[in-house]
Image: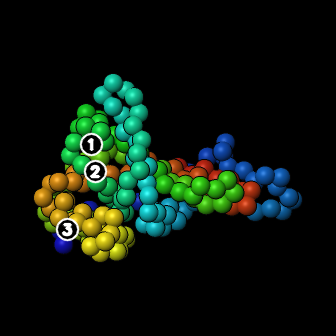
Amino acid sequence: MPTHEPAKQPTTELDARYSSALNPSPGAAEVTATEWTEAQRQLEAAEIFWVSTVRPDGRLHVTPVIAAWHDGVLYFSTGPGEQKTRNLAHDGHCALTTGRNSLTEGLDVVVEGKATPVADPAVLEEVITAYEAKYGAHITSPEGTFHGIGDAFRKGDAMVFAVSPATAYGFGRDGGVYSHTRWAF
């Protein structure tokens, strides 16, 4: 395995403007920032992410992707001719979003950063291993939706992008308690 820089640990800040308890009772627990370790658990477990990129003419492009969190980096893939790839060639800045589709519970996480293409064969093998561990039979079984994705990565038939977080946001909901956390790297 190649040597990686240690994952950066972010500063954590609660944004009180968007953090509150609905109808807080006297003595209710104070709303606190979400720990980065909890956000990482969400990034590791989430099956679908929405990647937002910007077209050369300034219009947004948002689409779902699968992704793997590995060694402090979020990896996703797309076809070499797809709109995402063309957008990222023009401007690598993007956001990946994941979370729960619930008003009252869960944690939504947004990772902002610059997507860089991954070409190093050793890193590609790590990403393939991370994808296989995360998505299992979806990738490893001949009947899997994404079977053969590892070979597509190796041959360049699918582009792999790495996004090291520059900033991330967590939007937590727990039974009427809302928190907005910002992590800066």
Q: Which secondary structure lies at badge 2?
A: strand
Q: Residue 12 location, x and y as percent? A: 52, 54
Judge from the rendering whether residue 172 lies leftward or rightward of residue 169; answer left or right.
right
Mark 3 or 1, closer to the camera: 1
The three-letter code of the residue at mark 3 reads Glu
Which residue matches tag 1? Answer: 82
Q: Is residue 24 above or below residue 16?
A: below
The three-letter code of the residue at mark 2 reads Thr
Label 3 vs 1, first from the N-terminus: 1
Characterize the local packing of mark 2: few (<14), some (14-19) or many (20 or more) Cα atoms within 10 angstroms: some
**Does the rendering let one see residue 102?**
yes
Q: Are marks 3 and 1 in contact (CB under 8 Å)?
A: no
Q: Which mark is residue 78?
A: 2
**Does the rendering let one see residue 8?**
no
Name the quadrant containing residue 2.
bottom left
Q: CA distance from mark 1 to mark 2?
A: 7 Å
Which residue matches tag 3? Answer: 125
The three-letter code of the residue at mark 1 reads Glu
Q: Are marks 1 and 2 in contact (CB under 8 Å)?
A: yes
Q: Residue at x 66, y 60 (%)?
A: 105
Who is closer to the viewer here, 132 or 148?
Answer: 148
Q: Residue at x 67, y 49 (%)?
A: 19
Q: Residue at x 61, y 46 (%)?
A: 15
Name the quadrant containing residue 140.
bottom left
Q: Is residue 5 above or below residue 17?
A: below
Mark 2 or 3, closer to the camera: 2
Please, which residue is most extreme toward the front here? 143
Q: Residue at x 19, y 59 (%)?
A: 153
Judge from the rendering whether residue 114 lies leftward or rightward of residue 36; answer left or right.
left
Q: CA distance from mark 2 to mark 3?
A: 17 Å
Q: Residue 147 location, x and y as percent? A: 27, 67
